[in-house]
Amino acid sequence: MSMKEKKKSYIYIILEILLVVSLYLPWFGGDRFLQEIRGVDLSYTIGYFYVLIIVSCLGIFSTSETTRKISIGALIGFLILQIYKFFTWHYLTITGYMSLFVSFDLTYPEFYISLFICIVNIIVRIKEINIWGSDDNNKSCF
């Protein structure tokens, strides 16, 4: 393994660790320290979060391009679950209906940090394997 590949692996591992740590930050709630809901407190989907993180970690240590694409799919699934939680976390406990205003009003900045970490992780992985291929002759869309 060359030094460049080791550096890439370290970056991927750091991004994965940040993603897991962001699950333990408060995402939603009213008053700080009284009514916080962390990412891990959303227990009925936390199993999905961890399965998707494990699958995405497999792509770090794999040399197969197919496995790396599957790990990107897992990260996209993680992102979709985060967005789903953003829209629906208050549905059963607070409002009884879906409200975008309530979602924005009661979401802490830590949720957006977690979302940002996930998006950066996806972009870095896509850029690394060049999922769409590169054709130097056709740099223009026209």
Image (cartoon, rainbow, N blue to C red):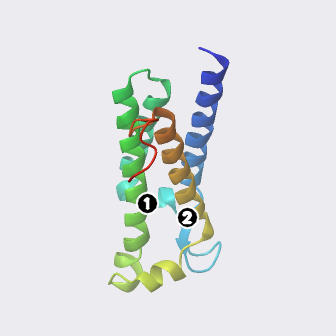
Q: Measured from the top left, where is residue 117 in percent x and y?
A: 57, 52
Q: Amino acid at mark 1?
A: Gln
Q: Taking 78 as reference, is 89 above or below it?
A: below
Q: In whole angstroms, how far apart are the C-alphas of marks 2 and 1?
A: 9 Å
**Residue drawn at 38 percent across, 27 percent down:** 65
The residue indicated by pointer 1 is 82
Sequence-first tag of 2 and 1 = 1
Would you say residue 141 is visible in this rendering? Answer: yes
Q: Nearer the viewer, residue 62 or 24?
A: 62
Q: Measured from the top left, where is residue 12 in percent x and y?
A: 57, 36
- Quick check: marks 2 and 1 in contact, CB under 8 Å? yes
The residue indicated by pointer 2 is 111
**110 left or right, relative to 76:** right
Q: Taking 59 as reference, is 16 above or below it?
A: below
Mark 2 Cα-neighbour bin, 10 Å: few <14, some 14–19, many ≥20: many
**Residue drawn at 54 percent across, 66 percent down:** 27
Q: Nearer the viewer, residue 132 or 96?
A: 132
Q: Measured from the top left, where is residue 76 in percent x and y?
A: 39, 50
Q: Measured from the top left, where is residue 110 in percent x and y?
A: 61, 64
Q: Secondary structure at mark 2?
A: helix
Q: Quarter of the image containing the N terminus?
A: top right
**Residue drawn at 42 percent across, 82 percent down:** 100
Give the quadrant of residue 113.
Answer: bottom right
Mark 1 Cα-neighbour bin, 10 Å: few <14, some 14–19, many ≥20: some
Give the quadrant of residue 137.
Answer: top left
Q: Amino acid at mark 2?
A: Phe
Q: Secondary structure at mark 1?
A: helix
User: How many marks overall?
Assistant: 2
